[in-house]
Image (cartoon, rainbow, N blue to C red):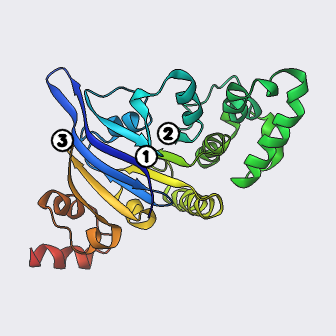
Amino acid sequence: MTNLAEIRGLRKDYGALAAVDGVDLDVVAGETLAVVGESGSGKTTLTRLLLRLEDPTAGTVRFDGDDLFSLGAARLRKVRREMQVVLQDPYSSMNPRLRVTEIVAEPLVTHDPALRGRRGRAKVRDRVAGLLHAVGLPSQAQDRYPHEFSGGQRQRISIARALALEPRLVVLDEPTSALDVSVQAQVLDLLADLQDRLALTYVFVSHNLAVVQRISDRVAVLRAGKIVELASSRQLFSAPAHEYTRSLLDAVPNPDPRLARRHAVTT
């Protein structure tokens, strides 16, 4: 196994609060690493540091061997092509005045000046059509606005935009929490298919442990900025080692009331 990213001694303070507190973590190429924990546990701060959207108080993040926090602007710009993010609420991350073509193409034209202007317009439309097809949307969607789509469709557009630069790492920050259960399943299936076809590596941030169990290879449990447990998904869900992990699993609603009553009796 090859590490795509290596986090060592990572810390981020906001005044007297350590949002991330001495985290050591590897992200293995081709895996889905889930990061779970309650609100305020440091999940989002950790991923923002991983993407170098913030600078740490201490520690390092290496991406494919490069220390992200020591890179100059030109080199960092190249590395950023390989790291993309899909956010929780797709609608809030889109400019409602732009058509889908412009939304999905934004990273393309930002990183490739040759695609700007009239000469690049046809290439951009072809590329966007291909990206939309990859996420299960018709090419005609290019000319529509975000409000014309359902929540699940908008999340597919966000995924298409994240894939535009052919990244190696995609951070998925609660990508299904705003979606209905049936739509969640469709988006998770899409993510799994894209990962297989494009050799993607995912860091999947979520508080929904049912979703995490379905999609993850490994799980890092974060509490008050510290990793309290790191295990394979199978091991963590069958035999959690830390009491905090067990409390998270116990809080998951059981859809079968008979099993829920039996669990209450045995505990």
Calculate the distance from the C-alpha at mark 2 to the C-alpha at mark 3: 22 Å
Calculate the distance from the C-alpha at mark 3 to the C-alpha at mark 1: 19 Å
Mark closest to the chain's N terminus, 2 or 3 = 2
In contact (CB < 8 Å): disc 2 and disc 1? yes
Q: Which mark is residue 220?
A: none
| Vertical position of residue 85 compared to residue 200: above or below | above
| Vertical position of residue 135 compared to residue 52: above or below | below
Percent coordinates x, y for residue 108 in the rendering: 71, 32
Task: Specify the amino acid type for callout 1.
Answer: Glu
Residue to which mark 1 is pinned: 174
Q: Is disc 3 surrounded by few (<14), some (14 to 19) or many (20+) residues within 10 Å?
A: some
Q: Is disc 2 surrounded by few (<14), some (14 to 19) or many (20+) residues within 10 Å?
A: some
Name the foreground residue: 50 vs 150.
Answer: 50
Task: Specify the amino acid type for callout 2.
Answer: Leu
Residue to which mark 2 is pinned: 87
Question: On the image, which quarter does residue 59 sit in?
Answer: top left
Percent coordinates x, y for residue 32 in the rendering: 45, 59
Mark closest to the chain's N terminus, 3 or 1 = 1
Residue 69 horizontal side relative to residue 254, left or right: right
Mark closest to the chain's N terminus, 2 or 1 = 2
Name the foreground residue: 239 vs 201.
Answer: 201
Percent coordinates x, y for residue 206 in the rendering: 37, 50
Q: Is disc 1 surrounded by few (<14), some (14 to 19) or many (20+) residues within 10 Å?
A: some
From the viewer's perspective, is the residue at label 3 or at label 1 nearer? 3
Residue 192 horizontal side relative to residue 165, left or right: left
Q: Secondary structure at mark 2?
A: loop
Task: Specify the amino acid type for callout 3.
Answer: Ala
Residue to which mark 3 is pinned: 224
From the viewer's perspective, is the residue at label 2 or at label 3 nearer? 3
What residue lies at 31% left-to-right and 52% top-to-bottom? 36
